[in-house]
Image (tube, coloured by chain):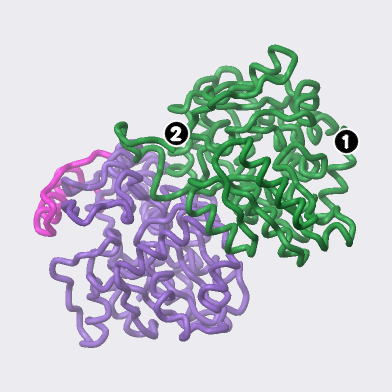
Chain colours: A green, B purple
Amino acid sequence: MVTRDDILQAAERIRDRIHRTPVLTCRAMDRLIGARLFFKCENFQKVGAFKMRGACNAVFSLGEQDAARGVATHSSGNHAQALALAARMRGVPAHVVMPVGSPAVKREAVLGYGAQVTDCEPTLQAREETLAEVVRSTGATFIHPYDDERVIAGQGTAALELLDQVRDLDVVLAPVGGGGLLSGTAIACAGAGRPPRVIACEPEGADDAARSLAAGRIIPSVDPDTVADGLLTSLGGLTFPIIRRHVEAVWTVPDQDTIRAMRLIWERMKIVVEPSAAVCMGALLGRSREVAGLRVGIILSGGNVDLDRLPWAVRQDEPKG
Amino acid sequence: MVTRDDILQAAERIRDRIHRTPVLTCRAMDRLIGARLFFKCENFQKVGAFKMRGACNAVFSLGEQDAARGVATHSSGNHAQALALAARMRGVPAHVVMPVGSPAVKREAVLGYGAQVTDCEPTLQAREETLAEVVRSTGATFIHPYDDERVIAGQGTAALELLDQVRDLDVVLAPVGGGGLLSGTAIACAGAGRPPRVIACEPEGADDAARSLAAGRIIPSVDPDTVADGLLTSLGGLTFPIIRRHVEAVWTVPDQDTIRAMRLIWERMKIVVEPSAAVCMGALLGRSREVAGLRVGIILSGGNVDLDRLPWAVRQDEPKG
């Protein structure tokens, strides 16, 4: 299992290759919730998301020979960009299997970082089969978007920084999709001197983490449906046990609260965050009494948005997806 | 005429009442332009715009008796919010004459800061007549949005901070509407140890500054038409002579470049800026050769945008305004 030492080593390994992102505060938000909120701005991270941390740690953990054959992944978004950039930094190839219909801005970014893109149908099976073929033919190392110890350790460095930047946090909120960020955050916090509680925030329409924790076993999402398109994936075999052990609760969030939170963050804080990053603030809109007077860390996971498809601009009669 | 000492005093006066805003950099932008760009983020300022500096300096410059009778202004936007907040900070009334049809987000913000709002028709004459009536009936002090020495000195504190935060700037770019920010910026820079050149950036559809400087006299805009709705106003009797003396050039910018720049800033830097704030970056898109290799300061003037009316989302057949 990933340990806090793994996260400390990851932080050392990637330090000069990522941004130490700022923590922002906003009095209007504090007043709205009745707590002190500290926003860890991973939307300012390289490639616009925390995913750069895990990808970078994974790529630079590889031995020379493995690295030379490149890395590969399947991802519709931020992990793909991150892996592409990390590979370019190390001077090795990156192969990305990407479902057709991915947002244009994300596809272009992956290509811009020099990755090879192989299209596949937007099903898990097609992604895995296409990836297997790419790995077989190139010898590249598969870097899973979240169910990978190197990735989890890398993602944990965001919370590590947050704890260094802000003293005496009572609670840390992180969004959960596959659980890479959440499990890294949980391990980083669990080992802190005065450990904050860690609470996961999850879209109602993709609530596999809440159901899995309640059931005591992984219950994958079936046809998840949420505006938070970075949180569609389900917990993995590595992330589930960590989350089960270290995460106090999972708060599920209706999309309407996530959209309202996203807009509030844009309007009041003047920063661009993606829907998946707004889920934690969305959770607080409905649960402010549970954090009254507390010092709350919030990981804003990313800022990669298609500006032509903002959630408050999509008409009711338009098809989704 | 406003001096650099006035700006230094303003900085002292408002220090604890405003944000010292950060300066952001972005490698993608640097590569695009071929220069080193330093973005002074007044979109993170209180009320979301540099206007807080001038309004705050003006309100806190007043003697006790004048202050008690309140302040008044006509403004469709950021200055009104700023004056309202500054007045609330000092515990005195603020009266805002606002044209009907102002963006909802700006009107609500002014009301939220506790100002009295008096509607008027969206013409200069109606604004001035309504304002005169408000001043007559309340005894409030009129604080002009830009043609006021206290306001100019306050706006100059943004450039003062920028020069303190970034060494050896070659050029500083500021947008110009009425010229409050620009003239304050010019005075702050002119008195610096190693003064950077100051260049104004102005929408093509509201190019009174360019024409006024060319003619050597103020030539007000007639029916200005630009997406940069904070830059519709024309130079004033106080700002024109300062700009004439200290500003090296005025670069006019087509709206399409401003919109492209605004979108680039949102997508690459993950921050929300209003169209008026994107005019300088828009200018650079067409003039990168003129700043090749230079260290360029850019004042991002504000971030107050109606998220339901983003310029790239407005259809060609929709009415403007």
Residue furthest to the top? A215
Chain hosting mark 2: A
Specify start and end residues of the magenta stretch as a single range. Answer: B113-141
Task: Write the residue at 82% across / 56% down.
Answer: A60
Q: Which label's residue is closer to the chain start, 2 or 1? A: 1
Task: Write the residue at 34% across / 67% down.
Answer: B180
Image x and y of residue A156, in percent:
76, 40
Give me the C-alpha separation between circle 2 and circle 1: 35 Å
Residue B205 position (above or below residue A78): below
Q: Nearer the viewer, residue B285 or B170?
A: B285
Residue A221 position (above or below residue B313): above
Res A296 visible: no
Chain hosting mark 1: A
Q: Which mark is residue A3?
A: 1
- Tell me if mark 1 has few (under 14), some (14-19) or many (20+) residues whose alpha carbon lies within 10 angstroms of its own: some
Query: B127 left or right of B203?
Result: left
Mark 2 highlights which residue? A259
Residue B88 position (above or below residue A296): below
